[in-house]
Image (cartoon, rainbow, N blue to C red):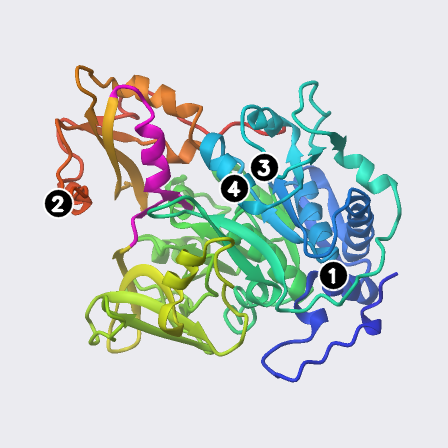
Amino acid sequence: MNSPTTVPTRHADPRVPARETCVVRYLIDRFAAERPKQVYALFDGGLSFTFGELARRTRCIAAGLAQLGVAQGDHVLAWQPNTPEMLLTFFAINYLGAVYVPINTAFRGGVLEHVIDNSDASVAIVHADLVPRLHGVRLARLAQLVVVGGAVPAQVPLPSVPFATLEHGAAEPGPLKRPIEPWHTQSIIYTSGTTGPSKGVLSSYLHMYTNPGPEAWHFVTGADRFLVNMPMFHIGGLGLSFAMLARGGSLVMPERFSTERFWPLVRETEVTVVFLLGVMATFLLKAPPSPDDRRHQVAKCFIVPLSEGSQQFHDRFGIDVYTIFNMTEISSPIVSEPNPAVRGTCGKVRAGVDVRLVDENDCEVATGSVGEMIVRTDRPWAMNSGYYKNVEATVSAWRNGWFHTGDAFRCDADGNFFFVDRIKDAIRRRGENISSFEVEAEIVAYPDVREAAVIAVPSEFGEDEVMAVVAAAPGREIDPAALIEFLRERLAYFMIPRYIRILPELPKTPSSKVLKTDLRTTGITVETWDREKAGIVVRRDKIGN
């Protein structure tokens, strides 16, 4: 057994916690020794892992990956839905000191190809239902697949082994070449680009620890059980899983969020904390009132962004509501008090973080004025370490020693922050960041389209809907329904536009740049085509059971 007591842990800087406090390998070893029979994770179907079982299975899978050639510092792709195997994949990769690189399960086509190429991974752990999407995609350095969630398909583009075989080899991986330090890279998470392809956010163990850590989320403790209904390829699912491991707490991980299943699940599993996107909270509030609305153990709930019904949520379900502002790149710099009375707030600056609102020259704006939020932390390595293989984006985001969020805020005299708009040309739909650049690239590949601009328009559920403004190629006409069918095989379901507006020509500046500001101002017009009104349904592919 790899005992954490054999590893020296002290660091000269008191802001940097010991390895067994924030590094996955040492956390797993520590809690397996301290509380082997305590439950850490519960899943659909009644399966659960104690800390002891988690350690045993993690070590076996790590040993199997090592036999495939995965070494400390290597990048390993993980392309799966939320399942017990995905959680074990995450921990086994990090147990070796390798880098966890998750892929959104909706990715396909050019976006998928870009992530595979940019990641520099040679091994990928992929759900069987996703393997067919790899055909016809350039696989770059990828040389080995581990197939999970079903038999290895008959047609597979690379040498492949079943996930189950990873657990049938050595019970322990070999010794590390060097200790895994808090500042070493833990993951690369791909987030939406703006004027370019998706960027890989480099996160250290200390960044992942700090993001939902005790300084930021002091009201979440090791006594809590957290419902993780965000995917493990996002900071939401990954960060919460990490947070409850670091606290020695527990989590419940359903495969996906379900309005109908939500309350029965939290009652059955004795959940005490939940994280909801604003639209999820809206769905729960729209369900008919029930005598059982307060029959649960949930005491705390994050709603992000804070919806109009947050007070109603608190009153109806008896749950304290919190909200935050966060991104993959930062570490929860803005956190609210329970049940914030100030309408529309994201919260206030937490301890350990500096936040400024600045103009285009990084000069601070006056209180009450709108400026871009920039952030830095007291603790080293507590935010992202840049964008993988993207020096230009890293330098731009980190200029003048501050991380530039690309989001516009205002702050009142009491220190309450309010989100105003996105400065960057990105769209957020139901928790997913969408690159307008990537959507536009696929739209203009359609033969009938000459040019396209993709913008955000308001959704009735909060956040954004995707709108494409297009102009036809010479001598052609655009059929919106046919365009949607074309995009189904080229874009993630959440990236496919709901609205399509057809113009003779897109408005432009004298330098021929599209005036997206004008398009956003005009928004949805009477002639704009609405996919949902046309009865065209776009849903995520079913993966697994």
The reply to whether dot 1 and dot 2 touch (C-beta < 8 Å) is no
| 485 shown above or below 65 | above
What amino acid type is highlighted by mark number 3? Ala
At horizontal 30% and vertical 76% (from top left) the residue drawn is 415
What amino acid type is highlighted by mark number 2? Thr
Q: Which residue is mark 3?
A: 140
Q: Quadrant of the N terminus?
A: bottom right
At horizontal 69% and vertical 46% (from top left) the residue drawn is 89
Q: Which residue is mark 1?
A: 25
Badge 2 element? loop
Q: Quadrant of the C terminus?
A: top right
Other-residue count near label 4 (Cα within 10 Å), few / some / many at <14 / 14–19 / ≥20: many
Image coordinates for residue 537, horizontal then vertical, percent = 38, 23
Q: CA distance from mark 1 to mark 4?
A: 26 Å
**Which one is earlier in the sequence, the residue at label 1 or at label 4?**
1
The reply to whether dot 1 and dot 4 touch (C-beta < 8 Å) is no
Q: Picture quarter containing residue 95?
A: bottom right
Other-residue count near label 2 (Cα within 10 Å), few / some / many at <14 / 14–19 / ≥20: few
At horizontal 42% and vertical 73% (from top left) the residue drawn is 376
Q: CA distance from mark 2 to mark 3?
A: 38 Å
Taking the image as shown, residue 387 lies to the left or right of residue 223, namely: left
**Which one is earlier in the sequence, the residue at label 2 or at label 3?**
3
